[in-house]
Amino acid sequence: MTIFSLLMEKCVRIFNLILFFTLSWSYTQETVITVDGEKLTLNDGSSFISQFDSILVGNGEFGGIVAIIDMDSSSEVLINYEIHNDYKIIDEILFQKESGVNIAVLQQLFSNLTKAHSYNSAQTIVKELRTGYPFIPSNIHLNYGLMNNDRLGVLVNFKPEFNSHFSGIAGAGRQDDRGWDIAGEVDIHLENTWRTANITDLVWKRNGDESQYILFKHEEPYLAGLPFGAKLELIQDLRNREYVYTNSSGAFSVQLGQRGKWYFGGGKESIKPTAYGISMGIQPSKAQTFTIEYFSDGRNDRWLPTKGFFLNMKTHIGRVIETKQKNNLVAQLQFHIEEFLSISERTALRFKFWNGLVLDNENHVGQKIRYGGMNTFRGYQEDIFTSDMINIISLDMLFTPTEQLQIFSFGDMSMPTIPMSVGFGLRQLTANSVMEVSFGWPVDEAFSAGKVHVKFTSLLD
């Protein structure tokens, strides 16, 4: 039942009688209706209520009513109405049990709906909520109705689009000795395993025989009815058999503002050189850290996006301990933006900016940013570059002939020293998997020196 049909009971009895008379009359002749000075013509009496409903709920505030100004009974029935808005916000949020998520979590997740004062404001709140929680679908449906004691309720009807998956990346390229170097990555991503809309990630990467990266991350969007969530992250990184970098951190997540979500937390990190690293002069290091992160994902699709905007910012500040330096601060800044520009119905451009900066008085190799490969700089080996400042600009031309296939060409450029790379590839989506294959090469090298990147994702949901 819609809000209009429920609030119509607030109108006077004579209005109901005239409305009944008008509806009966309209079956036999044309009805001309004026609402706030706008003339509406109805030839089908059955659409009378639905059209009033659309005007009142779609354009007016919650709590609005339609009142008769005057009525002219003639060969053409003319009725004048006026909309009166009585400002009201949503009092209670209800959910269908088959959503698959605990109701307590959903209540916290959609709590901003209690600030909605109209149909349009409620839709805007849900749209902005999706930027922080991509499992909320774009076609979510809200049903409004009056409850006991004139309380306005909304029933949120949606099926979450959770996206658990298992993926693997392989990269291959020919070296100067004409041999092949192979790198790989395995990523296990689980969502809503405990009916709390939680996210769990386990990543394992291997780059040659002397480097290995392991990450474990778990996030709960809301904790036991509290108005905030939490994230735990553990990292162990062996680099070129020189040193082992470890990081253990935790953060609270909150919604500040209308879009995306923020993380505030801290942790500890250490760099322990191996015997080989000590022989190269690498020193051990320990630090206590504080982290601020912002995440907002407004892309229209997880796998084959063609519209929307993505933003992820991270600030990582640490105080190095057990060091001889007096000024022992270290800071890392990362900035990742993606924006899509539609050219036609099936063609779009993707602009990507990935920037990073490290401020480290000790200039420790373990604090530098590593990049290269499929996710950062295509056409090069995985994590082949090390720097304390990066600025990578990518431009992709996307052609999406079907909902399951996307073909693209790309250019990646790093400012200012590394030659840009160009290439092409495709992404294919099926009911059970996603396959992405790309080939890129640096513009200062021969085509045969290019790198092939393959990523296979098995969908578990």
Image: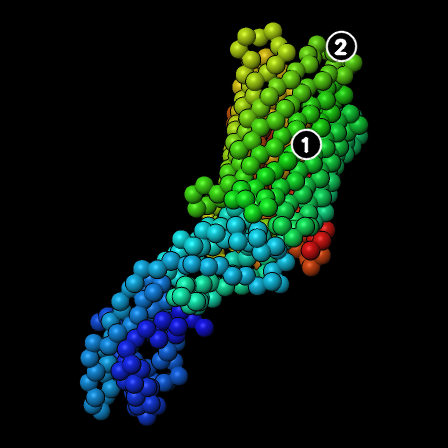
**Residue nearest the observer in this picture, 288 or 354:** 288
The Cα atoms of the two marked residues, 1 and 2, are separated by: 28 Å
| Residue 398 visible, this angle | no
Residue 257 position, x and y percent, is 43, 43
Q: Is residue 3 above or below residue 49?
A: above
Give the total of numbered labels: 2
Neighbor class of circle 2 (other Cα within 10 Å; few <14, some 14-19, many 20+) is: few
Left or right: 137 with respect to 24?
right
Residue 334 position, x and y percent, is 53, 30
Q: Residue 134 has which mark?
A: none
Neighbor class of circle 1 (other Cα within 10 Å; few <14, some 14-19, many 20+) is: some
**Residue nearest the observer in this picture, 336 or 149:** 149
Residue 96: image quadrant is: bottom right
Left or right: 240 with respect to 289?
right
Q: In percent of the image, x 63 and y 58: which residue is there?
A: 100
Residue 279: image quadrant is: top right
Q: In terms of sequence position, does the residue under pointer 1 or pointer 2 come before the other?
A: 1
Q: In percent of the image, x 68 and y 45: which residue is there?
A: 189
Q: Residue 279 has which mark?
A: 2
| Residue 208 visible, this angle | yes
Dot 2: element: helix
Q: Is residue 163 above or below residue 151?
A: above
Residue 294 position, x and y percent, is 51, 37
Dot 1: element: strand
Q: In percent of the image, x 24 and y 71: which residue is there?
A: 82
Amino acid, disc 1: Leu
Q: Does the residue at mark 1 contact the one at mark 2 (Cβ under 8 Å)?
A: no
> Which residue does the numbered mark 1 point to in the structure image?
234
